[in-house]
Image (spheres, rainbow, N blue to C red):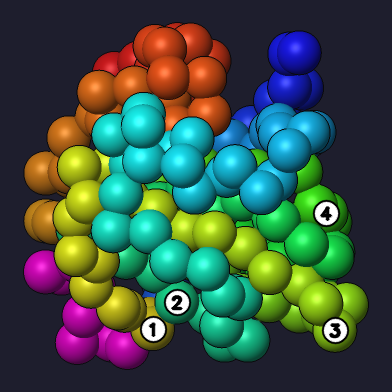
Amino acid sequence: MEARTQTYFFQDDGRIPNHPDFPLVVYQNALKDTGQAERIVNRHGWSNSWPGSVFPYHHYHSNTHEVLIAVRGEAVIQFGGEKGAAIPFKSGDAVVIPAGVGHKKLSSSADFTVVGAYPGGVHYDMKTGEPNEWEEAMKQIKQVSLPAKDPITGKREPLLGIWVK
């Protein structure tokens, strides 16, 4: 089963830095069996995983990339800050969020649940776009290395084919 991928590149909006080189990668229909989501991404080297939801305010992580997989329900998530894209996200979809890319839940079904994880199990930082965060965050974002594998396929593709420097 080949998930369809879409990419979105976001510019620094003055509050949310976004990533200077890597686009957001959305995988539609990434997983048929969402009950295995956490096991799959962990097996592919993305760990420090958790089930939950997405915060209803703009935030980002400057020290790691993140994968989110919708395992139940549906939502609309805004990526890239206030001027970013509102993307529908339903059970079975996944998204790989590059370090620095803002995300915020705009709306969701009552049962909406995601599994999140980070390459190499990095303990993520939490940034909300405060003016005093920007300079240090940009330094961190540029230093975050490429993950070893795509969190969904466990191979280089499609993620590392998209995220070429």
Residue 157 x/y as whole percent: 48, 11
80 with respect to 31 (left or right): left
Q: How many marks?
A: 4
Residue 4 x/y as whole percent: 76, 22
The rendered magenta stretch, by its main secondary structure, is classed as helix
> Contact, CB < 8 Å: mark 2 with mark 1?
yes
* Circle 2 crowding by C-alpha within 10 Å: few under 14, some 14–19, many from 20: many
Per the model, the C-alpha gap separating discs 2 and 3 is 22 Å
* Circle 4 crowding by C-alpha within 10 Å: few under 14, some 14–19, many from 20: many
- Disc ID at residue 59: 2
- Disc ID at residue 110: 3
Per the model, the C-alpha gap separating discs 4 and 2 is 21 Å
Residue 76 x/y as whole percent: 80, 67
Residue at image coords 29%, 18%: 165
- Disc ID at residue 90: 4
- Disc ID at residue 52: none
Report helix, strand or loop for mark 4: strand
Say whether disc 4 or disc 2 marks the residue closer to the N-terminus: 2
26 with respect to 51 (left or right): right
Would you place residue 94 above or below residue 102 in this image?
Answer: above
Q: Let me know if residue 12 appears in the view.
A: no
Residue at image coords 37%, 81%: 129
Per the model, the C-alpha gap separating discs 2 and 1 is 4 Å
Residue at image coords 22%, 51%: 121
Say whether disc 2 or disc 1 marks the residue closer to the N-terminus: 2
Per the model, the C-alpha gap separating discs 1 and 3 is 25 Å
Residue type at mark 4 is: Lys
> Is-magenta flag for residue 44?
no
Residue 163, picture quadrant: top left
Would you place residue 127 above or below residue 138 in this image?
Answer: below
Say whether disc 4 or disc 3 marks the residue closer to the N-terminus: 4
What residue is shown with label 1? Answer: 128
